[in-house]
Amino acid sequence: MLETLSDSVANSLVDALEQMAFISALPPESPLAVPTQALLIRIGFRGPVCGRIDLLADEAVGVLIACNVLGPDCIDAPFRARDALKELLNVTCGTFLAQYPPVPGQAFEMSIPEVQPLDCVTWESMLAQGDFAPFDAEGHALAIRLADRNPS
Amino acid sequence: MNVIVSVSDAKTSRDPASVLATYSLGSCIGVSLYDPVAKIGGMLHFQLPTSTLDAAKAKERPLMFADTGMECLIGQMQSIGAAKKHLKVKLAGAAQILNDNNLFNIGRRNHTAIRKILWQHGLFVDGEDIGGSSPRTMYLAIADGTVTIKTQGNSLNL
Amino acid sequence: MGYRFLIVDDSATTRAIIRRTIQMAQVPADKVLEASNGMDALRLLAGEPIDLVLADLHMPEMDGVEMTRRLLADPAICHIPVVILSAEPSAERLEQLKRDGVRGYLRKPFTPEGVRNLITQTLEACHA
């Protein structure tokens, strides 16, 4: 069951990247390299089940999203990168939770996504936990997992 | 009179008697552009999402790729009098063909790539028949801009 | 005379996507204002005539549900149509908002064509 849900989170991320940012994400051909600007973005949810989704991302993915949606001449894309990644996770979480069978009177509540920089040691140790689905987003590293899932 | 658009090819026309047609759209995408004011149409049949996959090939055959192919097609249409702001865009193809043995679903990547290019050109998709696993044929009638898709005996107007 | 839009979303990226979609749709637009939460949106609505509000639901300070509730309860602005563009997973909650007076909704991730259709249909219905 958990494996299926993890797949579902990963598929929701791929759908969100394609639809909102025109980016194709593929399973990486080799292990993800540690990015220069590594970020951890988190969103929590409460409802019929509770949990959290963690997204590890190269900040360059956020720049790519901003460039794609705002146009290649967008000069402030680097400043919009973190906002773009937070919105990516917000949309991913909504897509994922919409697949749960509805429970009357028990709608999901999603938190506002939070972003924090990561050093390379933390990036590598988190990825080594093995529950992240890694992706190559047009040359940039991205990984997602469903964490702390519990019945409410 | 049918004007055939081959694989990795593009054609334009302002002849109201002509119909642009492209066959064997599997994971490839057929892009139909039509200016209803000038009654000018164009069609591209591209195979791959981006010219960055093979820059040398893109120079030799720009119509093979979504990005370089669209630059050529839009340029050709403007050169014979079409206006970008009038263009109606229709897409067909991006199937995941069985026995294609393609792990990375090139059809889906092609669809994502063409949507990005259209967005960057400020163009909406006005109709599409995308995905599935069957090959398609796409027709564009220059007289009125009707786009028809044929798949395994079925016919659909976009 | 063009329309005046108000985009309410805490994501600057999404506000930029919606703004560009309005431009691409060739809808006559006099003004496109932005707010990053419901509270700022209500402040703008108090001082500016607006023809259509495009609002997210999940926002800090004041969310879209509360903003919509206050807008619909205020006789000075309750006539302004509101559409929701949100990652909200609950279809039941979105349908309830429609019953309460919201004109339509679109789930994120949306397509540019979906946003265009929602805008044009809502404006046509309001000015029929």
Image (cartoon, coloured by chain):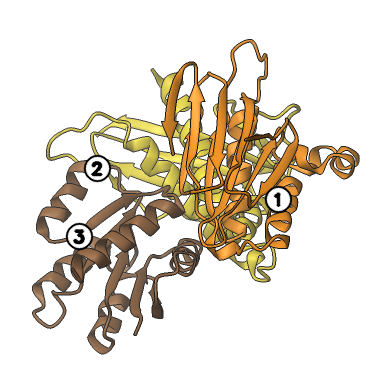
Chain colours: A yellow, B orange, C brown
Callout 2 secondary element: loop
On the image, the x and y values in percent for residue A131 come to 54, 27
Frontmost residue, B128 versus B3: B3
Write down the residue under mark 3.
Answer: C103
From the image, which quarter does the C terminus of chain A lie in? top left
Residue shown at the point (58%, 32%) measured from the top left? B108
Callout 1 secondary element: helix
Q: Residue A23, can we see it?
A: no
Which mark is nearer the camera, 3 or 2?
Answer: 3
Which mark is nearer the camera, 1 or 3?
Answer: 1
Q: Residue B91, can we see it?
A: yes
Q: Distance from label 1 to label 3 (Cα)?
A: 39 Å
What amino acid type should be assigned to the residue bearing mark 2?
Ser
From the image, which quarter does the N terminus of chain A lie in? top left
Relative horizontal placement of residue B34, taking residue C57 as reference (left or right) = right
Relative horizontal placement of residue C5, taking residue C21 as reference (left or right) = left
Residue C89 is tagged as none
Residue shown at the point (27%, 59%) measured from the top left? C121
Relative horizontal placement of residue B99, taking residue A8 as reference (left or right) = right
Q: On what subunit does the disc labeled 1 rest?
A: B
Number of residues whose C-alpha sits closer than 10 Å to that of mark 2, classed few (under 14), some (14–19) or many (20 or more)? many
What amino acid type should be assigned to the residue bearing mark 3?
Arg
Write down the residue under mark 2.
Answer: C90
Q: Is residue B29 above or below residue B153?
A: below
What amino acid type should be assigned to the residue bearing mark 1?
Leu
Q: Distance from label 2 to label 1 (Cα)?
A: 43 Å
Residue shown at the point (75%, 35%) measured from the top left? B8
